[in-house]
Image (cartoon, helix red, strand yellow):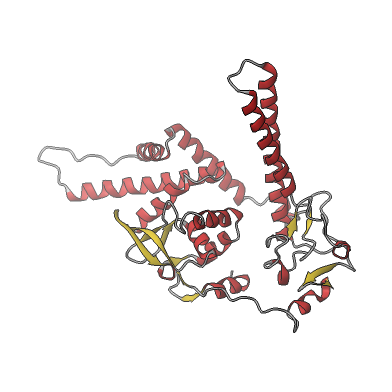
Amino acid sequence: MKWLGYKQLATGSVVLDMPDIKLRMKAPHVAALSEDAAQAGNEYIHAPTVRDSDKRLVCGRDRMAGALLKRRKRMWFHLVEATDQEIAELEERENIYRRHSDGERAQSLARLVELQKQKIRADEKASTGDSVPGAGTASKPPKDEKTITSEARKAVARAAGVSPAAVKQAEKRAAAKAEESAAPDEAEQEGAIVYELPDGFNAFGLIVSQDEIREIENITLVLGDWDKANRRTLGHLTDIEKAGGAALAPAHAQKIRERLQAAGHAIRDAIPSALCYFCKSLDTLRAACPACGGTGVVGMHGGDNVPPELKLAEPKARVAVNGKFVLVGAAENASVGADAKPAKSAKSIKVTQVDGSVADLDSVIDDDAQAF
């Protein structure tokens, strides 16, 4: 593997796995990453990695997705020349440092061990093939599977900053997870999993897709965990204040309390409590809706100061289109009516896909619903 330094490239020249990039472009953390880069001079602190020979994106898929969200036409990349085996290892090494779930990290460590074992076998084969033992000297026996596995775990442990025992445990968790995924559970045998909206969620009597319900349920659980953690921190602060004697000035303690309370209010306000009153999460209106920011949902104060016409339930549910309230069923026609303002065209950007084809970014995303 040889690192070639940094170079500015046209984003359209980088070969991308567009189905994966397209999914990442929808993720909230990618949008946040994109905004952060925009505020830091439109460049990332760690540039995405590209193989020089074929311009394939190796590492930094979230960063690339964030750049495409901003329609970036050129950006800095870290160039590397490496074999397919080394590329696979690079990808896994980056994965073990990402902030993901324990299960995902375990899978990355397990895959890295397998790649390291392949590398050890290849090196051993190359060394024995190039050398001839001297007269009267017995040839060195090949390493057994146990020795190779042990060496691979030690190498991965050094790279990940953990112990070989921790790597072994990660392999066991990854194997158990793979076994669990391979065996269909009861729900899968009976049919598709059915997701339900959180208690009290206001859908105005409208039909909400299972994909949207899953997203709403997931973010509700995440924000709920954050709120609990914030409350626990406030409790610890109260305990410290009651105990006294700690090297924490009352003025500092008060500032911490105020910020924690403000964070708690912000978290609870963000928990989805209703479909957006203005767009009702309709495909024709959601993306350009400023009230919900394109999410299709609002928090507990999302209905404050909202016109009563927009609080009506099915069959009288209405949405706001070009300053007018129209029935949900008529929203699609109203949004493209004669008085509708033409949408401002975004900058066109070309992307290169893994099959070698070049296409407009927007057309790839639009076709995704059918192709992927």
Depth check, front residue: 178 or 268: 268
Residue 116 place in picture, x, y as percent = 37, 46
Closer-to-camera residue (270/161): 270
Q: Position of residue 50 (x, y in %)?
A: 38, 60
Give how far across and how far down residue 90 sits, in percent.
39, 51
Q: Residue at x 58, y 45 (%)?
A: 177
Q: What is the x, y in percent for residue 169? A: 50, 35
Q: Is residue 306 left or right of residue 354?
A: right
**Residue 139 visible in rendering:** yes
Extreme residue toward the front, this view: 251
Residue at 69% across / 40% down in the picture?
262
Picture quadrant where residue 223 is located: top right
Looking at the image, which is closer to me, 193 or 262?
262
Residue furthest to the bottom in view is: 338
Please name the residue shown 42% across and 57% down the image.
Answer: 48
Position of 127 with respect to 119 (left or right) is: left
Rendering quarter of residue 313: bottom right
Quadrant the C terminus occupies: bottom right
Q: Is residue 132 left or right of residue 83?
A: left
Q: How many marks?
A: 0
**As displayed, is residue 220 above or below residue 137?**
below
- Report if residue 191 is visible in the image: no
Up/down of 200 relative to 293, above or below:
above
